[in-house]
Image: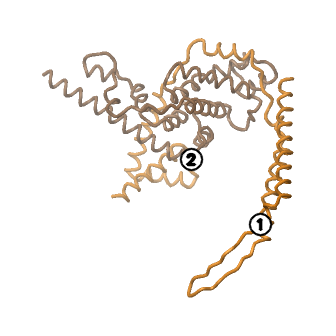
Amino acid sequence: MKADMENIEDLELHLWDYIDGRCNAAEQERIAQLLMTNELWRSKYAEFMAFNTSMHDNMAIDQPSMRFAKNIMDSVTSTTIAPAAKNYINFKIIKGIAAFFFIAIAGLCIVAFSGSSMHSTYTGYTNNKSSMNLNLSLLASPAIMNLMIIIGILLGLLLTDNLLRSRDKHVVR
Amino acid sequence: MHNALDDIAIINLVLQGQHTAYAVLITRYQQYVYTLAMRHVNNRELAEELSQDVFLKAYRFLADYKGTGKFSTWLYTIVHTTCLSHLRKNNDTAILLTEDQILSLPNQQSADPIDRMEQQTQKQLVEIAIKQLPKIDAQIITLFYLAEQSVEEIGIILGLTASNVKVRLYRARQKLKEIMEQKCMHELSEGYKLTTDNH
């Protein structure tokens, strides 16, 4: 019963693909053959085509008020078209920030793993336990922390400066 | 004057400073934008307000339209995001009618059920059935049949994969057929009951 339902659903999905023109040539030919020889496919096809026609003919389109276009055009006169985003987004800065984070994460991993000890113990028939101790104390040293804070502040200042500059440019325009 | 021009040509004119050409795009797409907004909010005033907002946003960011896809697809994406952000801000939820509410929706005013059944146009039936669908499915059906967007374009507009849209479209069609058949059967049985009572 369930298999029959799945078959019907499969048939219907294929048929809709055929009607919507979403089949490849081979599939299209196969379905065209089935429509000529198989009564079930033919009746489903007729049913779907009737549904499609009904939808195309009977879907109502809503009308806004008479003043709709005029209202928008009134507002448009006082609106300026913004420059394309690609003109004011500096992709070099975005790439720079991405590179910084990537390098920082990679550096952290290298530092953390270089200070770790990794060993394996064989404890019986199938148990193979391995333990890994990361030496995070290396990262928590005051010098590294200060360096991180300074880099963070510098990046923050650069970002703010860039934002303010782009805003100024828009105001001038 | 600009009516015969295609969308890209009109956009170029607007970008060159002829902002009055934008009126052609508004006239061309206002009904579709408004209908799609109605599918989201189901309120005429609010749909009109949101549609105006959509056209203003599209105007402001017209330089960002790359021209790789259809202008209509880009515009309907703005409709979708504008309506969604409005609904999120106002914490609105979809208002779906129950089966009983659908079956008891008022028809034309004739007292005779047979007349009433005849008067109930196919258009009403389709509209009632679409209102019963979940919002996203109603939008997919509207975009597919009314706005003539492909499955891939609908995917771009609604932020779904093409295969997801395809399956949803299939289910929405099934559901629509069921609702329309159910509604017709209900009308027929009600008509039959009343005529036998009269005899």
What element does badge 2 sit on?
A: loop
Question: At which x and y percent is residue B142?
Answer: 52, 32
Q: Which mark is residue A112?
A: 1
Question: In which quadrant is the N terminus of chain A drawn?
Answer: bottom left
x 34%, y 18%: residue: B108
Q: Classify mark 1: residues with Cα within 10 Å, few (<14), some (14-19) or many (20+).
A: some
Q: Is residue B16 left or right of residue B28?
A: right
Q: Residue at x 73, y 33 (%)?
A: B65
Q: Identify the residue at image location x=19%, y=28%.
A: B193
Q: On screen, B164 above or below A50?
A: below
In the structure shown, which secondary structural element does the residue marked by tag 1 occupy? helix
- Answer with left or right where residue B78 lies relative to residue B87: right
Chain of the residue under the numbered disc 1 shown in the image:
A
Mark 2 falls within which chain? A
User: Which color was chain A given?
Assistant: orange
Q: Disc 1 marks which amino acid?
A: Ala
